[in-house]
């Protein structure tokens, strides 16, 4: 079978394929191209996508403290705001940058605000926390109160079921 047999004909003349911006499926194709483009762009740079939270945060807990580590590469401490209010640790700020290559003739500017909120457990000592920032890594240490360190025994009822 030749390729000529597979091409639809209209009254003896070959139909020309529709341009992407015309026809009933043009809008659908543009939207699909945009959606796939967004997906692949976000996979290439997750810190700027809405799909994943940025900055990435790691939580660790020992018997004495809660440690929150956030990766903020390329930022300085002046770009970051850190606060604790009503049991919520908030890491926020803005990231600005510019890259250019005069040899190849391109430049790129980017800007973005970010905010991460982390709920702290009851018994976290919000008054005596400390934060250190070095080489793009923010480490926040929140000590546990004595009550939280001891824990609390919970009685188990063997009576009625709920």
Image (spheres, helix red, strand yellow):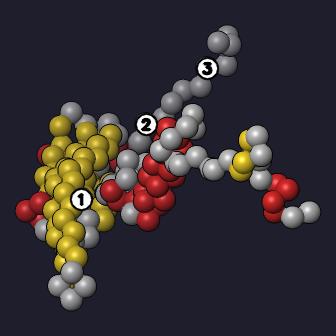
x then y, percent, for residue 23: 55, 37
Q: Earlier in the sequence, mark 1 or mark 3?
A: 1
Mark 2, Cα crowd under 10 Å, few <14 / some 14-19 / many 20+, is: few
- Residue position for label 2: 152
Residue located farthest toward the right when viewing the structure as drawn: 1
Depth order, front residue of 82/66 = 82
Horizontal relation, residue 20 to residue 99: left or right: right
Q: Considering the image in quadrants, where does the N terminus appear?
A: bottom right
- Residue position for label 3: 157
Residue shown at the point (87%, 64%) measured from the top left: 2
Q: Earlier in the sequence, mark 1 or mark 2?
A: 1
Residue shown at the point (46%, 55%) measured from the top left: 37
Give the answer, above or below, for where 14 lies relative to 153: below
- Alpha carbon distance from label 3 to label 2: 16 Å
x then y, percent, for residue 65: 31, 56
Give the answer, above or below, for where 100 lies relative to 58: below
- For marks 1 and 3, give the one nearer the viewer: 1
Mark 3, Cα crowd under 10 Å, few <14 / some 14-19 / many 20+, is: few
Residue 151, located in which quarter of the rendered image? top left
x then y, percent, for residue 56: 36, 59
Horizontal relation, residue 117 to residue 160: left or right: left
Report the disc number at residue 140.
1
Residue shown at the point (20%, 50%) measured from the top left: 113
Depth order, front residue of 140/11 = 11
Give the answer, above or below, for where 100 lies relative to 88: below
- Label pair 1/2, CB-CB below 8 angstroms: no
Q: Earlier in the sequence, mark 3 or mark 2?
A: 2
Residue 94, located in which quarter of the rendered image? bottom left
Horizontal relation, residue 2 to residue 102: left or right: right
Residue located farthest toward the bottom when viewing the structure as drawn: 103
Q: Considering the image in quadrants, where does the C terminus appear?
A: top right
């Amino acid at each position: 079978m030749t390729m000529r047999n597979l091409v639809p004909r209209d009254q003896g003349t070959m139909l020309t394929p529709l341009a992407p911006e015309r026809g009933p499926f043009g809008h659908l194709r543009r939207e699909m191209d945009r959606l796939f483009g967004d997906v692949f762009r976000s996979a290439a740079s997750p810190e700027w996508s809405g799909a994943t939270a940025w900055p990435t945060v790691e939580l660790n807990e020992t018997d004495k403290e809660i440690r929150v580590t956030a990766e903020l590469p390329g930022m300085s401490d002046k770009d970051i705001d850190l606060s604790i209010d009503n049991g919520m640790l908030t890491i926020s700020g803005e990231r600005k940058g510019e890259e250019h290559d005069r040899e190849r003739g391109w430049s790129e500017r980017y800007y973005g605000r970010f905010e991460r909120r982390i709920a702290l457990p009851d018994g976290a000592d919000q008054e005596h926390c400390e934060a250190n920032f070095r080489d793009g890594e923010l480490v926040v240490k929140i000590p546990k109160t004595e009550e939280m360190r001891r824990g609390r025994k919970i009685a188990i009822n063997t009576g009625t079921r709920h």
